[in-house]
Image: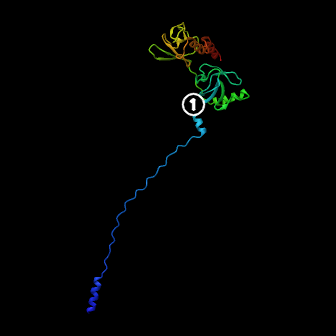
Amino acid sequence: MGAQCCAEKASTSHQLMEIIPQPEEPKPAQTPPEAVQEPVIAEQPTEEVAEAQKEETQGIPMVFEADGMSNTVYATRKPLGMVFEIDLPITIKGFKTNSHGEAIGVKVGWVLKSCNGEDCANLSKVADAMDIIMKHIQPLPVQEPLPGLPMVCVDESGVENTVYVTRKPLGMQFGETLPIKITNFRDNSHGQEVGMKIGWVLKSFNGDDFTRLSTFKEAMQILQKHTERLPTQMDLVEEKEEKASK
């Protein structure tokens, strides 16, 4: 009896304790690494595209030679209005009224070397040079001609005024000194007709700057150079009658 009792006591004193697992502390959320944005490298245009963009903004390059130096101008419209003999080398002899070629800087006596990169100087046939010019100039847009040759004058208050002369003679009177200041007009003066006033001072004519001249003779040469290409009143009447008869 006593042994049994001792056994019972021993068994009760060694009861196992139930271990209740403790909840784990939540781990701090990991911040995903920031995405590294790769630099965007702009695609470089090809040489052909770059050249086409240049032509679109500047025009068709035409290289001329004068006094051993190369001169490049950019044609942006047609017609060019340049006068030359159909012969090699192509040498500029003059310009038509409102010539685009003259407006972009071409000069009398210049020799065409290339048009849009194509050689025009080492050809054996003038027809080949003409084909090259036509190929590159033909796609250019046609610009309506200006109403005449621009003449810029400064009035007595210092304001610049631009008029466009379309025929000769201009019918202006001025002294033989610089600057050229209009003192009067002849009867039926074309200058007065287009809006010029007594007291105006001539600043430029068709792009030629009079303010840089040192002699009256130089001014007269510029006036004659541009006005001699203009039609007379009779020429305009005959042209009008000819169009009406067609």
Measured along the vertical axis of the image, is residue 105 above or below residue 240? below
Query: In this orientation, does residue 195 appear?
Result: no
Q: Quarter of the image holding residue 231?
A: top right
Q: In the displayed image of the protein, which residue is found farthest to the bottom?
A: 1
What residue do we see at 66% from left, 26% from top? 112
> How many labels, in total?
1
Question: Which residue position is annotated with label 1?
Answer: 58
Left or right: 170, with 125 as reference point: left
Colouring of the image: rainbow
**Position above or below: 125 against 187:** below
Q: In front here: 28 or 143? A: 28
The percent position of residue 239, horizontal first and vertical second, equals 63, 15
Residue extending furthest front?
68
Secondary structure beneath dot 1 equals helix
- Amino acid found under the numbered disc labelled 1: Gln
**Which quadrant is home to the C terminus?**
top right
Query: Which one is in front, 244 or 86?
Result: 86
Alpha-carbon neighbours of circle 1 within 10 Å: few (<14), some, or many (≥20)? few
Q: In screen coordinates, is 140 left or right of 162?
A: right
Q: Which residue is found at the position 57% from the left and 34% from the top?
A: 54
Q: Position of residue 60 (x, y in %)?
A: 61, 30
User: Where, quadrant-wise, is the N terminus in this rendering?
Assistant: bottom left
Residue 154 or residue 245, whichever sits in front: 154
- Place residue 25 in its image quadrant: bottom left
Q: Is residue 54 visible?
A: yes
Give the percent coordinates (x, y) of residue 50: 58, 37
Q: Is residue 111 left or right of residue 163?
A: right
Q: Quadrant of residue 87?
A: top right
Residue 134 is situated, as x and y percent measured from the top left of the image, at 66, 29
